Image (cartoon, rainbow, N blue to C red):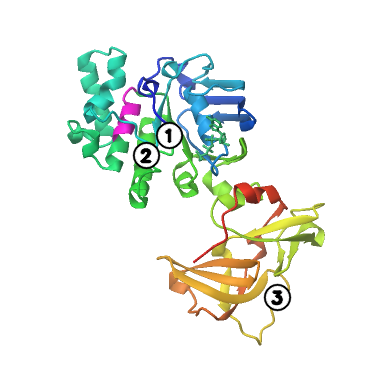
Amino acid sequence: MTTATDAETAPATTPGSTESRGAVLLEGITKRYGDQLAVDDLSLTIQPGEFISLLGPSGCGKTTTLRMIAGFEHPDAGDIKVSGRSVLNAPPYRRDVNTVFQAYALFPHFSVAENVAYGLQQRRTPKSEIREKVTNALDLVQMRRFGDRKPTQLSGGQQQRVALARALVNRPAVLLLDEPLGALDRQLREEMQLELKLLQSRLGITFVFVTHDQGEALSMSDRIAIMRAGRIEQLADADTVYARPASAYVAAFVGQQNFFRGPVTEAGAAISSPHALVRASEPLLPGASLGEAAVRPEYIRIEIDDAAVSLPGANATRGELIGVSHLGDTMQYLVRLGDDQSLIVRRPTPDSPALQVGDTVVCTWAAHHVLLFPEDEAAREGGYVPPPTL
Ligand code: ATP
């Protein structure tokens, strides 16, 4: 978790040219803490007005990257440009960025309006201008009527809105958000996701959003940078990272997957796993010897085993149903294939089969839903979702 400094509240003053205002350019930035390589030669071009998320598991370097853009950390190598200018030698308050943290970092003894006004006062903005800007900023987050309250008299969601108003009060070109919704409960978080996205499109400010919550990143971002060990593993829009993940690591981190592992066969078009021959519609792994096949739970059909029908030679498996759960619009089934593997299957509730725990079931899927990747042992340590439980 990060802590705020006064610099966070002091809007920056170095706008670049009109067309590049809000652009962020990271050029080969590296950051080490002792032996720990937190960010490793990372390059990223963020367009003005873009909503970009840095997504990845704990420790992959998201916060360090954000803090270097903010100016709270200095890279060991590389350059950072905001609005077309290098900011490496600029302190945080001279950059055209502001930061919103997970810990709202409001001053408890100040009122809401005073918290929002603080940065402007530090910069000796005229009083009448401060009043107008504070009112506008509180309006943006629908908090105008709470201006006289103290932060302790607000809910978590309201405090985060105030933190947002404080960061937006001077309309920075870039807003950096470090897990800003992490402390909110799920329903409030989902509401705030929608509001943040609306606010961002309305203001046209570049948002760089750090999260380890893939749902949050998928629902809000124009593009998502999926990070692994200080580098970007894939940079693409939500549809692409979901449907065409660049690696097993990304496939495992974004959405849920079933993985089958084993030798690559059929000239790179299939994986021979202990529980199924998993075939893709194209030979995606020519030359690889070990591979992983990924199939999403929603692409698997499940039915009661009818011993009269023999299983197809590929993309089919038999197992014991060990769990059924109602997720509202979908039903989720957990099927045990063997001691070392189970499958998650999800079907839309209206046409989900009536199955009982203990049933023997057959699971099948189409080749065009199969993704193949080279075997990636290391990915499992960082990005893999733990085995499913119901
Ligand atoms: P989280 O989601 O847990 O915040 P993250 O992806 O934001 O993780 P960072 O906080 O950027 O990751 O940390 C990247 C790596 O650098 C981690 O291994 C972390 O332990 C290390 N690190 C970060 N800050 C420091 C520091 N001030 N001193 C030493 N090591 C640090």
Mark 1 vs mark 2: which is more N-terminal? 1
Task: Give the overall secondary structure of the magenta segment.
Answer: helix
Tell me the number on the disc at residue 135: none
CB under 8 Å between callouts 1 and 2?
yes
Closer to us: 206 or 377: 377
Residue at the image position 37 percent from the left and 20 percent from the top: 11
Q: How packed is label 1: few (under 14 Cα within 10 Å), some, or many (20 or more)?
A: many
The span shown in magenta is 162-170
Q: Which residue is mark 2?
A: 196
**Residue furthest bottom in the image:** 308
Q: CA distance from mark 3 to mark 2?
A: 48 Å
Q: Is mark 1 within 8 Å of ligand 1?
A: no
Find numbered disc 1 in the image and state the secondary structure of the residue it sits on: strand
* The residue positioned farthest toward the front in the image shown: 34
- Residue indicated by mark 3: 312
- Give the residue displayed 39% in from the left and 28% down from the top: 4
Q: Is mark 3 within 8 Å of ligand 1?
A: no
Q: Quadrant of residue 12?
A: top left
Position of the N terminus by quadrant: top left
Q: Earlier in the sequence, mark 1 or mark 3?
A: 1
Tell me the amino acid under the disc marked 3.
Pro
Mark 1 in CB contact with mark 3 (< 8 angstroms): no
Residue 214 placement, left or right of 230? left
Circle 3: is it few (<14), some (14-19), or many (20+) Cα within 10 Å?
Answer: few
- The residue tagged 1 is 177
